[in-house]
Image (cartoon, rainbow, N blue to C red):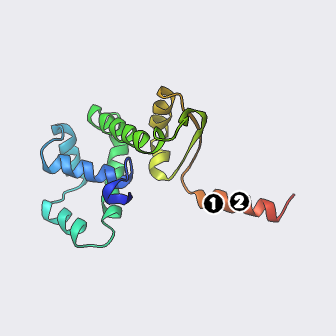
Amino acid sequence: MGYVLGDEASGNWFGRKLLNDFFNHQMPADIADDFIAAFPVSREVVLKHVYRETQPNAYLATYFPFIVEHKAHPYIREMIQFALLSFFKAYLFSIPGYEKYTLHAVGSVACLLEDEIKRMAEQYALQTGAFLNAPIKSLAEQIRAKEYPK
């Protein structure tokens, strides 16, 4: 469904949620203080990036490192759990017999949340496989191996 209607558990999703909670005063004070220190942004700056600049999804994803740095905090931990469960419900649980498949994940968000994804997968009897940050590198290695056998 794309980054506007879907994108559960993506960097864009986390950035959007973080900013929404911050500007709507739904973020715990200690996290809000850390957020202000890390990102001295205003509502006007954010709205400009989201509605007037190109690639608002990439802009929103720039806030994801903050999530990773604070993932031990209960507020962030709950956000991650909600996002992953939303992803699992939208894209995995709808597959008949999903438990018989192995979940492989691609991208920086998946790699940075690998432990959390594996824990959730275990809760739902789902096996996990490879977590690849840059799949093109792995694909290139596989192609090279076939072209130049040892």
Question: Where residue 130 appears, x then y in whole percent?
Answer: 60, 44
| Disc 2 to disc 1: CB gap under 8 Å | yes
Residue 62 shows in this picture: no
**Which residue matches tag 2?**
141
Which mark is on residue 120?
none
Badge 2 crowding class, 10 Å Cα cut-off, few under 14, some 14 to 19, many 20 or more, is few
Question: Which quadrant of the figure contains the C terminus?
Answer: bottom right
Query: Residue 137: which numbered mark, if any?
Result: 1
Residue 41 in the figure: left or right of residue 12: left
Q: Secondary structure at mark 1?
A: helix
Instruction: Identify the image quadrant of residue 91.
Output: top left
Relative to 94, residue 51 above or below? below
Q: Is residue 88 left or right of residue 144?
A: left
Q: Quadrant of residue 55?
A: bottom left
Q: Is residue 38 positioned above or below 113 on the image?
A: below
Which amino acid type corresponds to the residue marked 1 in the rendered image? Lys
- Cα gap from disc 2 to disc 1, whole angstroms: 6 Å
- Amino acid type at circle 2 is Glu
Q: Is residue 43 left or right of residue 143?
A: left
* Residue 40 in the image, given as x and y percentages of width and height: 19, 57
Q: Residue at x 30, y 39 (%)?
A: 79
Is residue 145 among the parts visible in the rendering? yes
